Image (cartoon, rainbow, N blue to C red):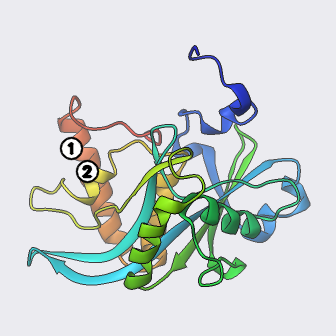
Amino acid sequence: MSGSDWGNLAAFEKYGRMVDNMGDYSMISYNEAVSETYTTHKHASHTMLLARDPRVLWDLYQARAAILMQMRFDGVIGFPGGLVDPGENPVEAANREMVEEIGLDLKKHSITKDNHIVSYFNDKKSLVLHFFGLEVTLEEFCAIELQNLQAPDYGSETLGILRPPLYTMGDNYRGLPAFLSNSFAGNARDELLLGLEHFKTHTAEEIQVAVVAERQHAATHPNHAGLTNLDS
């Protein structure tokens, strides 16, 4: 198969193109996002699963929280989720995708409108993104991580899960700033940072310090730093 062959992915290929930057995304309210204004647009739902973690690692760094992200089939990092199917609303799609991609047991945990964090509109792709946040206990989080191996889409749409490090190490780069230098799906990088502030694991100032540290490292080590699809 050549690089231009997409098979049954052809209809959805444009939504995953690695050409986004932050200026392509405008925040809109959930009610606006599901209004008639955007009924002809494609929608997608993604969810941050989070558990607070009080540990101090190596007697140095506060773990703060465990967050579930995944290595996607297209080689970039994102949150569990995907496109909203015809006849679904964004909440229903978020729950379905969490079952398919991480094996979430909806009898124990499910997403509601109250879990909504933010919606975005990308005019270039005619795409509306809905981002939700679901908090569980650390014990529940670990069980969900293990269940991920049995998820229907494991090994196809999702190629593994990972926890972002939420601390910054002594060189002011390793840890969260280094993680931010990876390539992310769509605006998942921005969603991660917004989620950290939403759940109050970090202050806005702490998040900005990590962002600046990543940018400074990229500027001084251009051949080493990863390039994200959100760099302007």
Q: Position of residue 100 (x, y in %)?
A: 63, 59
Which image quarter: residue 182?
Answer: top left
Q: Position of residue 3 (x, y in %)?
A: 56, 17
The tag on residue 178 is 2
Q: Nearer the viewer, residue 203 or 143?
A: 143
Q: Position of residue 207 (x, y in %)?
A: 34, 65
The tag on residue 217 is 1
Q: Given the image, on which type of amino acid does mark 1 rest? A: His
Residue extending farthest to the top is 2
* Distance CA(mark 1)–CA(mark 2): 9 Å
Q: Given the image, on which type of amino acid does mark 2 rest? A: Ala
Q: Position of residue 139 (x, y in %)?
A: 38, 84
Q: Nearer the viewer, residue 208 or 109?
A: 109
Position of the N terminus by quadrant: top right
Going 28% across and 63% down the picture, which residue do you hit? Answer: 165
* Vertical side of 218 occupied by 143: above or below: below
Which image quarter: residue 87?
Answer: bottom right
Q: Residues within 10 Å of mark 1 (few under 14, many from 20)?
A: some
Which image quarter: residue 30?
Answer: bottom right
Relative to 77, 101 lies left or right: right
**Disc 1 on helix, strand or loop?**
helix
